[in-house]
Image: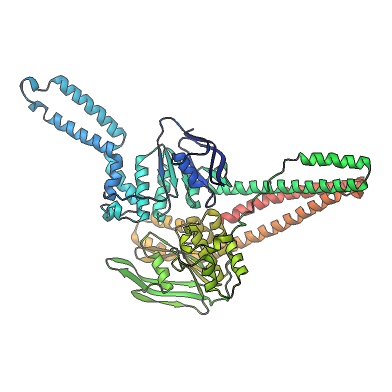
Amino acid sequence: MILSCQNIAKSFGTDVIVSGASFHIEDREKAAIVGINGAGKTTLLRMIAGELEPDQGVVSIAKGKTLGYLRQHQDVNSTASIYSELLDVKRDLLEMEDSLREMEQQMRHFPEGRGGENRCTSADMEALMERYNRVSTEFENRNGYAVRSQVVGVLKGLGFTEDEFEKQICTLSGGQKTRVALGKLLLAEPDILLLDEPTNHLDLNSIAWLENYLQNYEKAVLIVAHDRYFLNRVVTKIVELDNGHVMSFEGNYSAYAQKKAQLREIQWKAYLNQQQEIHHQEAVIAKLKSFNREKSIKRAESREKMLDKIDMLEKPSEVKADMHLRFSPREVSGNDVLQVRHLAKSYPNNPLFSDLNFDIRRGEKVAVIGDNGTGKTTILKIINELEEANAGQISLGSRVQIGYYDQEHQLLHMDKTLFEEISDVYPDMTETEIRNLLASFLFTGDDVYKRIRELSGGERGRLSLARLMLSNANFLILDEPTNHLDITSKEILEEALRNYTGTVLYVSHDRYFINQTATRILELKNQTLNNYLGNYDYYLEKVGEQAQKASPAAVKDERSLSSSKEDWARSKEQQAQKRRLENELRKTEERIAKLEERDKEIDALLAQEEVFTDVKRCLELTGEKASVAEELEELYVKWEELSELSAND
């Protein structure tokens, strides 16, 4: 065990952030802390890192082990270059290398030593050789000869190009500074890596590189991240922080989500069963008291004492019950929603793309992916007439109404309150309607009078989604819609988009989100678009096949095949299979609901005096209850299998 947290508690005023949290991390283990925004994940990391003192409890790190901590935001103003800043992490190896070069020089000129008393002796030479061999062995064991290539590899892996290596740290953006800090931390190789949202500011290629790096990292890692795809590929343990309490789950994020759902179902059943038993006992007590006889009153009092001793179960929180999001088009658009022809855009010394051609049809959910700086957001802005193209034509289909989500929330008015932001755009809404809407996006009470400039990134995101929902648009254009959203909010947005009958075009780096929502992917690469009919996993499959092809011509052929009839047929078959699964799942759920209702009816009948005094009737009902339970058990297993197939489809 390399890290142990025992009964950690932390409060700020009356707000309890963490209460009695206990968990541990083994050497080389990869774990993640998950929870909604505001749950206290960063606070927990800061206590482990020693930046905050817990109110109670103990954080223990194994003796002699080092710890490195990546914060979400970096305030670095060094005048050093990016390359020299990272290379400086290996300062001890560089000094060791200088020492080796110096000793080599001494050995090279040894015979030319000074005469007389100052002339070097053979003993001096032996001591020098011994020291050289010792330092050389350590230098080699620590991979000193690969230091510079290692630094270059980390910089390129994190998305820096060679022409950026000499940029001064103080001239970088916040996201670039965070990438520099992450690179320094990876090169330092601490025994415990604490990473707070490490995938922020990374493009898809850099995230994939970081995944591979952490998978092969031979020390412990503890991550806070909302990137579920990343968590699935990296971690083997989930530490959940919920309402101040901590619970650990073995496995990656998907395994956690499944176990959590099962646990929640068990908790709900236990809670409902207990409530049913309490209500039953209360009814029996009331009935016994109504007889108004000494024996019946004593029996009632006895039952009351038993009831008082029951350890009351807390009502489980509702799943995804906080934020309510539903997109409903005001009218149906034509089949042809968007047509783009020969689109081109460039800035001085920075050509983004040229001769882009693509169509979007009604009902499609299209994700645009690509490296940072390739022009993905620019395409969306051109479609929304927020930027001008250098060339090309954009045509919207009949009855198309656009709803736009801007990742920088520039459409929001920073000096307005939340209430004013909604009421000014939708003046026909009453105060009650606006308050109810904002409450459904977690803005309650005096929150509605906050200035938008005072909101966090996640809060601005929720407000933008609320505005977007009110638009009743039939063509949603979304720029990084999952940025700043916690996992629960992402899942709510995913469900809303899956149920949306309109058309969606979006830019995202969230691969899990793309997998859940996209029916087609447009990859912006080398200033052009590549088309893939499927979700992110399908895109990876096709890219992998392309990589195996030997010649550039074969790769080009493969790209053209991605939009061929064969892919179209495959897509249609996948959709048909998905519909069959969903239909079977729905039927199974309906049968389960019917049997569970009958099970409750039987319990109610067995509680009736005229029934439980009738032996024959009791036996019939008991037999039926056993049959219902047996069939339910089979259906639960079937439902679980169908749910897993549906999720993986």
Residue lying at the far bottom of the rendered structure: 398
Determine if residue 141 is in view.
Answer: yes
Colour scheme: rainbow
Name the spot of residue 600 as percent of width and height, x first: 79, 52
Direction from residue 325 to residue 3 in the image, left or right: left
Tell me if residue 266 comes above or below residue 409 in the rendering.
above
Q: Which residue: 18% across, 31% down? A: 103
Whether 129 is drawn above or below 189: the answer is above
As drawn, is 497 to the left or to the right of 282? left
Where is residue 242 shown, x and y percent of the image?
Answer: 58, 47
Which one is nearer the viewer's eye here, 586 or 60?
60
Residue 83 percent across, percent down from the top left: 28, 48
Residue for point 45% across, 37% down: 28
Residue 118: image quadrant is top left
Which quarter shows the C terminus? bottom right
Residue furthest right as drawn: 293
Q: Residue 248 sits in which quadrant?
A: top right
- 487 relative to 567, above or below: above
Residue under the point 64% across and 46% down: 263
Q: Depth check: 507 or 305 in front?
A: 305
Which x, y percent locates residue 576? 59, 63
**Residue placed most toward the observer, 434 or 548:** 434
Q: Specify the farthest residue to the left.
A: 115
In the image: residue 481, left or right of residue 176 = right
